[in-house]
Image: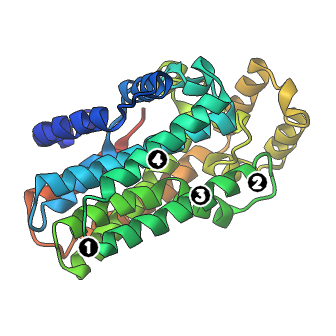
Amino acid sequence: MKLTKTYGHLKKELDIIEHALTEAIQSDHEILRESSTRLLQAGGKRIRPVFVLLCGQFGNFNMDRMKAVAVSLELIHMASLVHDDVIDDAPLRRGKPTIKQLYDNRVAMYTGDFILARALESITTLSNPSAHRVLSKTMVQLSAGEIEQIKDKYNWDQNLRDYLRRIKRKTALLIATSCKLGAIASEVSEHTAQKLFRYGYYIGMSYQIIDDILDFTASETELGKPAGNDLLQGNVTLPVLFAMKDTLFYKRLKDTFSDPEEVTERDMNQIIAELKKTDAISQSYRVSDHYLQKALNELSDIPDHKAKHTLQSIAKYIGKRRS
Protein backbone atom coordinates (compact mmCIF):
# COMPACT_ATOMS: atom_id res chain seq x y z
CA MET A 1 0.00 0.00 0.00
CA LYS A 2 1.21 3.50 -0.84
CA LEU A 3 1.27 6.28 1.75
CA THR A 4 -1.24 8.27 -0.32
CA LYS A 5 -3.79 5.47 0.14
CA THR A 6 -3.91 6.14 3.89
CA TYR A 7 -5.32 9.61 3.26
CA GLY A 8 -7.13 8.99 -0.03
CA HIS A 9 -10.35 10.44 1.43
CA LEU A 10 -8.64 13.88 1.46
CA LYS A 11 -8.27 14.01 -2.33
CA LYS A 12 -10.82 16.79 -2.81
CA GLU A 13 -9.19 19.00 -0.18
CA LEU A 14 -5.68 18.24 -1.45
CA ASP A 15 -6.74 19.16 -5.00
CA ILE A 16 -7.91 22.54 -3.66
CA ILE A 17 -4.55 23.03 -1.96
CA GLU A 18 -2.65 21.99 -5.10
CA HIS A 19 -4.54 24.59 -7.10
CA ALA A 20 -3.83 27.21 -4.42
CA LEU A 21 -0.10 26.32 -4.52
CA THR A 22 -0.08 26.85 -8.28
CA GLU A 23 -1.74 30.24 -7.87
CA ALA A 24 0.63 31.25 -5.05
CA ILE A 25 3.78 30.86 -7.16
CA GLN A 26 2.57 32.91 -10.10
CA SER A 27 4.74 35.89 -10.92
CA ASP A 28 5.08 38.53 -13.62
CA HIS A 29 8.76 37.58 -13.75
CA GLU A 30 9.11 34.73 -16.24
CA ILE A 31 12.11 32.98 -14.64
CA LEU A 32 10.65 33.10 -11.14
CA ARG A 33 7.36 31.72 -12.44
CA GLU A 34 8.96 28.98 -14.54
CA SER A 35 11.47 27.85 -11.91
CA SER A 36 8.85 27.75 -9.14
CA THR A 37 6.41 25.88 -11.38
CA ARG A 38 9.07 23.29 -12.26
CA LEU A 39 9.66 22.65 -8.57
CA LEU A 40 5.94 22.33 -7.82
CA GLN A 41 5.38 19.98 -10.76
CA ALA A 42 8.25 17.74 -9.60
CA GLY A 43 5.68 16.45 -7.14
CA GLY A 44 5.95 15.29 -3.55
CA LYS A 45 3.75 13.56 -1.02
CA ARG A 46 2.31 16.87 0.30
CA ILE A 47 2.56 15.31 3.74
CA ARG A 48 2.57 18.68 5.51
CA PRO A 49 -0.78 19.76 4.01
CA VAL A 50 -2.12 16.30 4.89
CA PHE A 51 -1.22 16.82 8.56
CA VAL A 52 -2.78 20.30 8.51
CA LEU A 53 -6.04 18.88 7.14
CA LEU A 54 -6.16 15.92 9.51
CA CYS A 55 -5.39 17.92 12.65
CA GLY A 56 -7.86 20.59 11.60
CA GLN A 57 -10.63 17.98 11.74
CA PHE A 58 -10.46 17.81 15.54
CA GLY A 59 -12.01 21.27 15.81
CA ASN A 60 -14.04 23.75 13.79
CA PHE A 61 -12.79 22.78 10.33
CA ASN A 62 -12.78 25.67 7.86
CA MET A 63 -11.31 24.96 4.43
CA ASP A 64 -10.19 28.54 3.77
CA ARG A 65 -8.18 28.61 6.99
CA MET A 66 -6.79 25.11 6.35
CA LYS A 67 -5.79 26.12 2.83
CA ALA A 68 -3.92 29.21 4.03
CA VAL A 69 -1.95 27.19 6.60
CA ALA A 70 -1.28 24.23 4.30
CA VAL A 71 -0.08 26.40 1.42
CA SER A 72 2.21 28.38 3.69
CA LEU A 73 3.85 25.29 5.20
CA GLU A 74 4.28 23.49 1.87
CA LEU A 75 5.85 26.58 0.33
CA ILE A 76 8.28 26.91 3.25
CA HIS A 77 9.23 23.27 2.68
CA MET A 78 9.68 23.87 -1.06
CA ALA A 79 11.85 26.93 -0.45
CA SER A 80 14.08 24.93 1.90
CA LEU A 81 14.54 22.27 -0.80
CA VAL A 82 15.73 24.86 -3.32
CA HIS A 83 18.24 26.27 -0.82
CA ASP A 84 19.36 22.75 0.17
CA ASP A 85 20.11 21.88 -3.45
CA VAL A 86 22.35 24.93 -3.78
CA ILE A 87 24.22 24.11 -0.58
CA ASP A 88 24.63 20.44 -1.61
CA ASP A 89 25.36 21.26 -5.27
CA ALA A 90 22.67 18.68 -6.10
CA PRO A 91 21.89 18.11 -9.80
CA LEU A 92 18.74 16.01 -9.17
CA ARG A 93 15.65 16.25 -6.98
CA ARG A 94 13.11 13.40 -7.19
CA GLY A 95 14.88 12.22 -10.33
CA LYS A 96 14.52 15.58 -12.10
CA PRO A 97 17.03 18.42 -12.59
CA THR A 98 17.10 20.88 -9.70
CA ILE A 99 16.50 24.62 -10.11
CA LYS A 100 20.21 25.34 -9.60
CA GLN A 101 21.05 22.77 -12.28
CA LEU A 102 18.58 24.21 -14.80
CA TYR A 103 19.48 27.83 -14.15
CA ASP A 104 22.27 28.67 -11.70
CA ASN A 105 22.85 29.18 -7.98
CA ARG A 106 21.76 32.81 -7.94
CA VAL A 107 18.47 32.11 -9.71
CA ALA A 108 17.86 29.17 -7.36
CA MET A 109 18.48 31.26 -4.24
CA TYR A 110 16.16 34.03 -5.44
CA THR A 111 13.54 31.44 -6.39
CA GLY A 112 13.73 30.01 -2.88
CA ASP A 113 13.38 33.52 -1.42
CA PHE A 114 10.40 34.24 -3.69
CA ILE A 115 8.63 31.02 -2.64
CA LEU A 116 9.32 31.82 1.02
CA ALA A 117 7.82 35.30 0.57
CA ARG A 118 4.71 33.74 -0.95
CA ALA A 119 4.49 31.41 2.06
CA LEU A 120 4.48 34.34 4.46
CA GLU A 121 1.90 36.11 2.32
CA SER A 122 -0.42 33.10 2.55
CA ILE A 123 -0.31 32.85 6.35
CA THR A 124 -1.23 36.53 6.79
CA THR A 125 -4.86 35.65 6.01
CA LEU A 126 -4.95 33.83 9.36
CA SER A 127 -5.69 36.32 12.13
CA ASN A 128 -4.68 34.18 15.13
CA PRO A 129 -1.46 35.67 16.63
CA SER A 130 -0.42 32.37 18.23
CA ALA A 131 -0.27 30.77 14.77
CA HIS A 132 2.18 33.42 13.61
CA ARG A 133 4.32 32.99 16.73
CA VAL A 134 4.49 29.22 16.24
CA LEU A 135 5.43 29.60 12.58
CA SER A 136 8.08 32.28 13.18
CA LYS A 137 9.76 30.20 15.91
CA THR A 138 9.79 27.20 13.60
CA MET A 139 11.42 29.20 10.80
CA VAL A 140 14.14 30.41 13.15
CA GLN A 141 14.84 26.79 14.12
CA LEU A 142 14.85 25.72 10.45
CA SER A 143 17.47 28.34 9.66
CA ALA A 144 19.62 27.25 12.60
CA GLY A 145 19.34 23.65 11.40
CA GLU A 146 20.56 24.58 7.93
CA ILE A 147 23.62 26.30 9.39
CA GLU A 148 24.33 23.30 11.62
CA GLN A 149 24.13 20.94 8.67
CA ILE A 150 26.69 23.01 6.77
CA LYS A 151 28.95 23.19 9.82
CA ASP A 152 28.78 19.42 10.41
CA LYS A 153 29.63 18.34 6.85
CA TYR A 154 32.38 15.69 6.83
CA ASN A 155 32.62 15.93 10.62
CA TRP A 156 33.18 12.31 11.62
CA ASP A 157 33.40 13.17 15.33
CA GLN A 158 29.80 14.20 15.88
CA ASN A 159 27.52 12.20 18.17
CA LEU A 160 23.92 10.97 18.33
CA ARG A 161 22.73 14.14 20.08
CA ASP A 162 24.13 16.28 17.24
CA TYR A 163 22.31 14.16 14.67
CA LEU A 164 18.97 14.14 16.49
CA ARG A 165 19.07 17.91 17.01
CA ARG A 166 19.82 18.41 13.32
CA ILE A 167 16.94 16.26 12.02
CA LYS A 168 14.62 17.84 14.58
CA ARG A 169 15.28 21.20 12.95
CA LYS A 170 15.58 19.88 9.40
CA THR A 171 12.38 17.80 9.26
CA ALA A 172 10.51 17.10 12.49
CA LEU A 173 9.68 20.66 13.53
CA LEU A 174 7.96 21.58 10.27
CA ILE A 175 5.81 18.44 10.43
CA ALA A 176 5.04 19.11 14.11
CA THR A 177 4.16 22.70 13.22
CA SER A 178 1.86 21.46 10.43
CA CYS A 179 -0.05 19.44 13.01
CA LYS A 180 -0.22 22.25 15.54
CA LEU A 181 -1.20 25.00 13.08
CA GLY A 182 -3.96 22.80 11.67
CA ALA A 183 -5.22 22.42 15.23
CA ILE A 184 -4.86 26.12 16.05
CA ALA A 185 -6.66 27.14 12.85
CA SER A 186 -9.61 24.96 13.84
CA GLU A 187 -9.61 26.25 17.44
CA VAL A 188 -8.98 22.96 19.23
CA SER A 189 -8.00 22.97 22.90
CA GLU A 190 -4.39 23.75 23.82
CA HIS A 191 -4.06 20.28 25.34
CA THR A 192 -5.04 18.55 22.09
CA ALA A 193 -2.95 20.95 19.99
CA GLN A 194 0.13 20.08 22.06
CA LYS A 195 -0.60 16.36 21.75
CA LEU A 196 -0.82 16.73 17.98
CA PHE A 197 2.36 18.81 17.92
CA ARG A 198 4.26 16.08 19.77
CA TYR A 199 2.76 13.42 17.48
CA GLY A 200 4.02 15.37 14.48
CA TYR A 201 7.45 15.80 16.04
CA TYR A 202 7.88 12.08 16.69
CA ILE A 203 6.55 11.18 13.23
CA GLY A 204 8.97 13.68 11.69
CA MET A 205 11.94 12.20 13.55
CA SER A 206 11.01 8.68 12.43
CA TYR A 207 10.35 9.80 8.85
CA GLN A 208 13.77 11.42 8.52
CA ILE A 209 15.57 8.46 10.09
CA ILE A 210 13.94 6.13 7.57
CA ASP A 211 14.87 8.51 4.74
CA ASP A 212 18.45 8.30 5.98
CA ILE A 213 18.27 4.49 6.05
CA LEU A 214 16.82 4.36 2.53
CA ASP A 215 19.75 6.44 1.28
CA PHE A 216 21.75 3.21 1.69
CA THR A 217 19.15 0.49 1.09
CA ALA A 218 16.97 1.80 -1.77
CA SER A 219 17.89 1.92 -5.45
CA GLU A 220 18.76 5.05 -7.41
CA THR A 221 15.45 4.72 -9.27
CA GLU A 222 13.50 4.67 -6.00
CA LEU A 223 15.50 7.53 -4.50
CA GLY A 224 15.61 9.78 -7.56
CA LYS A 225 19.31 10.34 -6.77
CA PRO A 226 22.39 8.11 -6.37
CA ALA A 227 22.43 5.76 -3.38
CA GLY A 228 24.61 7.10 -0.58
CA ASN A 229 24.20 10.63 -1.90
CA ASP A 230 23.76 12.16 1.57
CA LEU A 231 27.07 10.69 2.71
CA LEU A 232 28.72 11.81 -0.51
CA GLN A 233 27.58 15.35 0.37
CA GLY A 234 29.22 14.99 3.78
CA ASN A 235 26.03 14.50 5.79
CA VAL A 236 26.62 12.08 8.68
CA THR A 237 23.32 10.28 9.17
CA LEU A 238 22.20 7.74 11.77
CA PRO A 239 23.31 4.59 9.88
CA VAL A 240 26.77 6.12 9.43
CA LEU A 241 26.97 7.06 13.12
CA PHE A 242 26.18 3.48 14.13
CA ALA A 243 28.49 1.97 11.50
CA MET A 244 31.38 4.14 12.67
CA LYS A 245 31.42 2.20 15.94
CA ASP A 246 33.09 -0.52 13.86
CA THR A 247 36.77 0.50 13.80
CA LEU A 248 37.44 -1.02 10.37
CA PHE A 249 34.50 0.83 8.81
CA TYR A 250 35.53 4.06 10.53
CA LYS A 251 39.04 3.80 9.12
CA ARG A 252 37.80 3.01 5.60
CA LEU A 253 35.36 5.93 5.77
CA LYS A 254 38.03 8.44 6.82
CA ASP A 255 40.49 7.13 4.24
CA THR A 256 37.89 7.27 1.46
CA PHE A 257 36.85 10.82 2.31
CA SER A 258 40.34 12.19 2.95
CA ASP A 259 39.65 14.16 -0.25
CA PRO A 260 35.86 14.27 -0.81
CA GLU A 261 36.23 15.56 -4.37
CA GLU A 262 38.15 12.43 -5.34
CA VAL A 263 35.51 9.94 -4.12
CA THR A 264 34.33 7.74 -7.01
CA GLU A 265 31.16 5.73 -7.59
CA ARG A 266 33.17 2.58 -6.92
CA ASP A 267 34.37 4.03 -3.59
CA MET A 268 30.77 4.75 -2.59
CA ASN A 269 29.61 1.27 -3.55
CA GLN A 270 32.33 -0.21 -1.34
CA ILE A 271 31.43 2.06 1.58
CA ILE A 272 27.73 1.15 1.27
CA ALA A 273 28.57 -2.55 1.13
CA GLU A 274 30.77 -2.24 4.24
CA LEU A 275 28.07 -0.30 6.11
CA LYS A 276 25.53 -3.04 5.36
CA LYS A 277 27.85 -5.64 6.92
CA THR A 278 27.45 -3.89 10.28
CA ASP A 279 24.19 -3.80 12.25
CA ALA A 280 23.81 -0.06 11.58
CA ILE A 281 20.64 -0.46 9.50
CA SER A 282 18.81 -2.60 12.09
CA GLN A 283 19.91 -0.25 14.90
CA SER A 284 18.59 2.72 12.95
CA TYR A 285 15.23 1.04 12.40
CA ARG A 286 14.99 0.43 16.15
CA VAL A 287 15.44 4.15 16.83
CA SER A 288 12.78 4.94 14.21
CA ASP A 289 10.40 2.44 15.82
CA HIS A 290 10.99 4.11 19.21
CA TYR A 291 9.82 7.46 17.83
CA LEU A 292 6.84 5.88 16.06
CA GLN A 293 5.64 4.30 19.29
CA LYS A 294 5.94 7.65 21.06
CA ALA A 295 3.86 9.20 18.26
CA LEU A 296 1.12 6.59 18.67
CA ASN A 297 1.17 7.09 22.44
CA GLU A 298 0.40 10.80 21.97
CA LEU A 299 -2.82 9.87 20.16
CA SER A 300 -4.01 7.44 22.82
CA ASP A 301 -6.17 9.88 24.80
CA ILE A 302 -7.31 12.04 21.87
CA PRO A 303 -11.06 11.56 21.16
CA ASP A 304 -11.94 8.86 18.65
CA HIS A 305 -12.26 10.31 15.15
CA LYS A 306 -11.67 9.28 11.54
CA ALA A 307 -8.73 11.71 11.46
CA LYS A 308 -7.20 9.95 14.47
CA HIS A 309 -7.41 6.59 12.70
CA THR A 310 -5.71 8.11 9.64
CA LEU A 311 -2.91 9.56 11.78
CA GLN A 312 -2.41 6.11 13.28
CA SER A 313 -2.35 4.52 9.82
CA ILE A 314 0.25 7.02 8.62
CA ALA A 315 2.47 6.19 11.58
CA LYS A 316 2.18 2.47 10.93
CA TYR A 317 2.91 2.97 7.23
CA ILE A 318 6.04 4.99 7.96
CA GLY A 319 7.26 2.24 10.26
CA LYS A 320 7.00 -0.31 7.44
CA ARG A 321 8.34 1.96 4.69
CA ARG A 322 11.16 0.38 2.69
CA SER A 323 11.20 2.69 -0.32
Disc 2 or disc 4, which is closer to the eye? 4
Q: Quadrant of the N terminus?
A: top left
Residue under pointer 3: 143
- In the rendered structure, the answer to whether residue 105 lies left or right of residue 258 reads left
Q: Position of residue 180 (x, y in %)?
A: 30, 66
Q: Of callouts 1 and 2, which one flags the residue occurring earlier in the amino acid sequence?
A: 2
Say which element carries label 4: helix
Q: Position of residue 218 (x, y in %)?
A: 51, 28
Q: Quadrant of residue 9?
A: top left
Marks 2 and 4 sit apart, C-alpha to C-alpha, by: 23 Å
Say which element carries label 2: helix
Marks 4 and 3 sit apart, C-alpha to C-alpha, by: 12 Å
Marks 1 and 2 sit apart, C-alpha to C-alpha, by: 34 Å
Residue under pointer 4: 116
Q: Of callouts 4 and 3, which one flags the residue occurring earlier in the amino acid sequence?
A: 4
Residue at figure coordinates x 21%, y 65% from the top left: 185
Residue 151 marker: 2
Q: How many numbered dots are placed on residues in this image?
A: 4
Say which element carries label 1: helix
Q: Of callouts 1 and 4, which one flags the residue occurring earlier in the amino acid sequence?
A: 4
Residue under pointer 1: 193
